[in-house]
Amino acid sequence: MWGSDLPRTTDADITPATDTDNLHRLADALAELGARLRVGGEPQGVPAPLDADTLATRPVITLITDHGPLDVSFTPEGTTGYADLATRAVRLAVGDHPNVPVADLADVIASKEAAGRAKDLRQLPSLRRLLDRLRPP
């Protein structure tokens, strides 16, 4: 979404608000998307309850949907969740949708640093170069 020179990922990552009304909307959206738990060795995923009460108890949920993989992380590493990320989110065009809130690139970088996973650490030099190009001096 930010125009990185890294290979494109095949999944989408979201950080939703955790208030009860939003969890109900998220559960409805996941049902509409045909969401199932993403499990190794099960390319079609595994059916599981994805109601608002279940969503409220899971910090991260990796899913497969009828439209592809989706990761739901309520509190990405290095953040305190939606309210934190929303304060710095920018709006970008995503497909036919011109005004989608997206995590600020600096927050994406901070989250990958905090996660410390090898795959995230490998991406950091490229993401930092991109941030330098996008930010005025």
Image (cartoon, grey):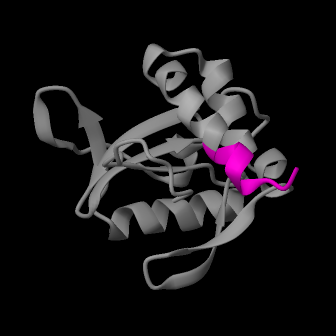
The residue at 31%/55% (across/down) is 35
Residue 127 visible? The answer is: yes
Total marks placed: 0
Residue 88 placement: quadrant: bottom right
| Helix, strand or loop: magenta stretch | helix
Q: Nearer the viewer, residue 96 or 128?
A: 128
Image: magenta residue range: 130-137
Q: Nearer the viewer, residue 51 or 17?
A: 17
Q: Residue 90 in the image: state x and y as whole percent.
A: 74, 64
Q: Residue 61 in the image: state x and y as whole percent.
A: 45, 37
In the displayed structure image, the side of residue 108 where residue 86 appears, left or right: right
The residue at 63%/39% (across/down) is 129
Q: Nearer the viewer, residue 104 or 51?
A: 104
Residue 127 placement: quadrant: top right
- Would you say residue 62 sits in the magenta stretch? no
The residue at 74%/42% (across/down) is 106
Does 107 appear above or below 115? below
Q: Residue 26 in the image: state x and y as whole percent.
A: 53, 61
Residue 74 visible? The answer is: no
The residue at 52%/82% (across/down) is 97
Q: Nearer the viewer, residue 118 or 72?
A: 118
Q: Residue 11 in the image: state x and y as whole percent.
A: 36, 48
In the displayed structure image, the side of residue 46 where residue 75 appears, left or right: right
